[in-house]
Amino acid sequence: MRPKSMLLEILEKASAKAVLEAKPQTEHGRIVDYVHFPFLAIVNQQEMKMALLLAVINPRVGGVLLIGPRGTGKTTAVRGLVDLMPPIQRSTCPYGCEPEAAYARGIDAVCRECAQKLARGEPITAPDRMRLIELPLNARLEDVIGGINERVALEQQKVRLERGILSYADRNILYVDEINLLDDTIVNAILDAAAQGRYTVRRGPLSSTYHARFVLIGSMNPEEGLLRPQIMDRLGLRVVINGLANDKYRLEVYRRVRAFTDSPHDMLALYAEETAALTQEISEAKARLPNVTITGPAERLALRLVRELQIASHRAEIVLLESARAHAAADGRLKATVADVRAVAPLALRQRRSEFITRYVAQCAAEDEEIRAKIESLS
């Protein structure tokens, strides 16, 4: 039997070190303003951690929705991804020009300065890491999509459009806590940007188009209201989270939270080695992903699952198969098999069935049959 990759091994067996007995660390690799609770220090909740990593490895899974009561580690897990972000190539141009656009559509697809750099053989991108961009609940529409800089307009008598949060989220993770409480106008802006990978801001004669190719992660407490179906459909993987039932696990949560509160840098140092190893594995899985193919049996199982569960949306099989590819890449393989489909199916297919649509389609089919019968009787 083939052993699991290091990524899956680290994820499933992250060291439950004796954080209360650990010796204080006197040296740290760096000093940061804000230290996040280590992702690998989250006790259990394997499905949640796996879903988040699959979305980082393969943005085509369509993001993640975390559903559960307060205090179950949803926001903690998402913010813990900061230390695991893989490297990417990011445009150095203020207009977001990318070399792929020039190669595919010609040199006119980039700005003049970038065209000159490409002609000289100079790069217009630079290595960077994915980032976590948080969208606060009190954000205005202008904050989200961008708009006129009011300060510059008043002080300098100049009208200038500035980027919004969605633009800064390009090729990053956009996280929305309490996503079910977002204002409808902001939800519509996110939906439009997520569907097209870009959006346009128009203010009078001024207009500007921005890239917005982000991985959307949302979390919510169902006690506070349901999520609109339109945005629910845009989130590929769904994780239903509950409090841990095992007393041993719950006590371990308390111990780790207390240790982190007492000395966050020491807690981070305890998991530094495993975090670095997992970060490297994620980068390698992301690089491996373009070469991962899906076997015929895996495809057939995915389609059968969708059919048997009476799911109408084609996004179901897209998310399922892309998640299977990410799972195989995480396991160090170039073929996604039936086992990969089985591993990710609950995440990809959960909450995608619609009793209303099933009844509606059946009603329409019955009406069509009645019409055809009437046509035959009168012919």
Image (cartoon, rainbow, N blue to C red):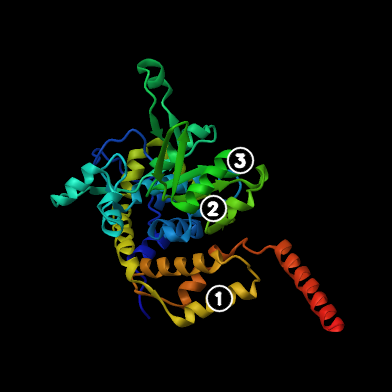
- Residue at (41, 69) in percent of width and height: 325
Instruction: Tell me the number on the disc at residue 65.
Output: 2
Q: Earlier in the sequence, mark 1 or mark 2?
A: 2
Describe the element under mark 2 as helix, strand or loop: strand
Q: Between residues 140 and 27, which one lies in front from this camera angle?
A: 140
For badge 1, the amino acid type reads Leu
What amino acid does circle 3 point to? Asp
Left or right for 162, reference 367: left
Q: Position of residue 299 (x, y in %)?
A: 49, 77
**Place of residue 227 in the rendered image (x, y in percent of width and height, measured from the top left):** 63, 48
Q: Which mark is residue 303?
A: 1
Other-residue count near label 3 (Cα within 10 Å), few / some / many at <14 / 14–19 / ≥20? few
Question: What amino acid does circle 2 point to?
Answer: Leu
Q: Which is more toward the observer, 88 or 362?
A: 362
Mark 2: few/some/many CA within 10 Å (<14, 14-19, 20+): many
Q: Nearer the viewer, mark 1 or mark 2?
A: 1
Q: Crowdedness of circle 1 by 10 Å Cα count: few (<14), some, many (20+)?
A: some
Seen at 27% across and 54% down, the residue is 102
Contact flag, marks 1 and 2 (Cβ < 8 Å): no
Spatial CA span between label 1 and label 2: 23 Å
Q: Which residue is mark 3?
A: 184
Please tell me whether mark 3 or mark 2 is closer to you in this view: 3
Question: Which residue sits at x=31%, y=41%?
Answer: 95
Residue 243 appears in the picture as rendered: no
Tell me if residue 332 comes above or below residue 128 in the rendering: below
Left or right, 150 with reference to 287: right
Q: Tell me which numbered mark, 1 or 3, is placed earlier along the sequence.
A: 3
Question: Tag 3, which secondary structure?
Answer: helix
Label 1, secondary structure: give it. helix
Q: Residue at x 83, y 84 (%)?
A: 379
